[in-house]
Each structure stands twice: as structure tokens, then as C-alpha cells.
Amino acid sequence: FARVYKIHDDKLDLDRAVKVLLPTGKKEVSDRFLTEARITARLDNPHIVKVFRVDEWQGCPFIEMEFIDGKSLETILLERGTFPVYAVCAVGIFIASALKYAHTLEFTLSDQHYKGVIHRDLKPANIMIHSDGRLKLMDFGIARPISTGLHTMGENIVGTLQYLSPEQLNHKGIDQRTDIYALGAILYELLCGIKAFPDEGLTDLVNKKASGIYKPFGEFPVSVPKKLTEIIDKCLCVDKEERYHSAESLIDV
């Protein structure tokens, strides 16, 4: 529903990223876009992309954000295949830190007070690594406060299937542990070079997620510390009660 452009602000002599909503004629899409802007603008963390303003251009709403001079984890994975263990750990710590902040943030939106924001669409394409090494989480397009379902698009499944938690696929209650599941899937992919749940058809994918079936680390030609595999396995538990209950508890491991 949107397209992202790189622009140059002549007055400030700075590059910016502008996300423009494409014309759809659907109110729920524009409402979701505005909610994304309002939520992201309240997130002030070194590992989350910064929003500067919301406006319109020729009738199309847009969000102006900081421009990240770098590559997404998805692009880097395509280029190199896998990440070394130390890099996987660094990504895990940085993203967990951003999630800890988002999951505990208290804010007011439309005169309603909320505590905590869940991203709901964590994936390598939504994580940027700046050329100077900084990591940035972006695209809160389907994020929502933990305590409510703002613009959830009814019973539609929103997000990217390979990284969705079982409870998202089954339309069950979701909370911060949904993001922790997705982080586990990302760390698995960085280590092994393939998705924990490859796109082999919706039915097969859903069944494997429901059963917690993915290729064991021991079947890959990489040496992974036992502690790290235990952490990822715990993030990917089918039952959310068996996962880390918070990003803070994950960081503390």
C-alpha cells in the first residue's frame, strides 16, 4: 500500500526517507497508515527509525523518516548466506533492546492511554544495518498497542507468514511474546542461512509452526554454541507461555 523514496532536504542539507501511501480509496488503509505514523513518532530509541513529520503530497499522505545509509538484514543474507555467531548475538541484543523499549512504552493516542507497542511484523527486511554499524528497526505498519486491536483488519492475517507466531495464525490473543517468536525466527535464519519455516505452501507452513517442527541446528554445517541454540529454541516455542515472557528477560540470559 505504500512506496518509500529517498529525498534530499535542501534547507537542512540532509537525506530523508519518505513513505508515501498509494491511492487505494480504502479508509482502513489510510487509518492504519496514520496509526503507524502516530505510534512510530512516539518511539524514541537509538535502534528504532525516527519519524520527523506526517503530511500530504498531491493528496497522498506521507511519513518523513530518517534515511538509513545501509542495507537490510534481508539483503545482507542474500549476499552472504549466513552471519557469524558474534554478529547474530549482536543483532539479537540490539533488537531485543528495541523491543524492550517498545513493549514497555507508555503513551497517549487519541486521548487514550496505552502501555506497550508490539511490532507484529518483525523480519529481516524490516531491520536495517547502517554503514557505520548501527542497527535500526523500522516499518511499524501493523504495530498496535498491546492492550488493544487498533486497525487489525478484521480476521485477516497480517504480517509475513514465515515469521508469524502460531497464535497470530490462529487468531488467538497476542502480546509481546509474538515479537519474541519472530526474533527467534530471524536469529535462526541468520545462523543457518534458511528460514526456520520456508515457504512450502500455507497448509504445510501452518502445520509445522503448530507442531514446532524446523530443521535442527545439528544438521547444519555450522558450529553454534549450545547456549545460543537453547535461546532460539525457547523463542520459537509453540506455546507462548514457554517462551521468554519479555524482551528484558531475553536480554538478561
Image (spheres, grey):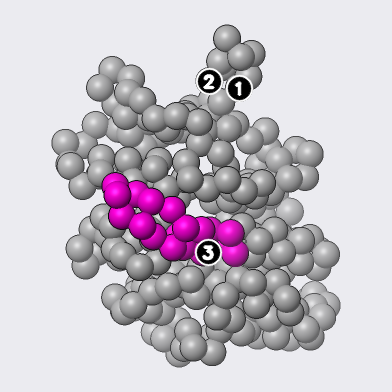
Marks 1 & 3, CB-CB < 8 Å contact:
no
How many residues crowd mark 2 within 10 Å: few (<14), some (14–19), many (20+)?
few
For label 1, the SS is strand
Residue 7 badge: 2
Q: Quadrant of residue 82?
A: bottom right
Residue 104 badge: 3
Residue 253 image offset from top left, x and y in percent: 74, 79
Q: Amino acid at mark 1?
A: Asp
Marks 1 & 2, CB-CB < 8 Å contact:
yes
Which residue is found at the position 31% from the left and 55% from the top?
A: 112
Which residue is found at the position 43% from the left and 53% from the top?
A: 107
Which residue is found at the position 63% from the left and 35% from the top?
A: 68
Q: Amino acid at mark 2?
A: Ile
Segment colored magenta:
99-121
Q: Is residue 107 magenta?
A: yes
Comes first in the chain, label 1 or label 3: 1
Mark pair 1, 3: CA separation: 31 Å
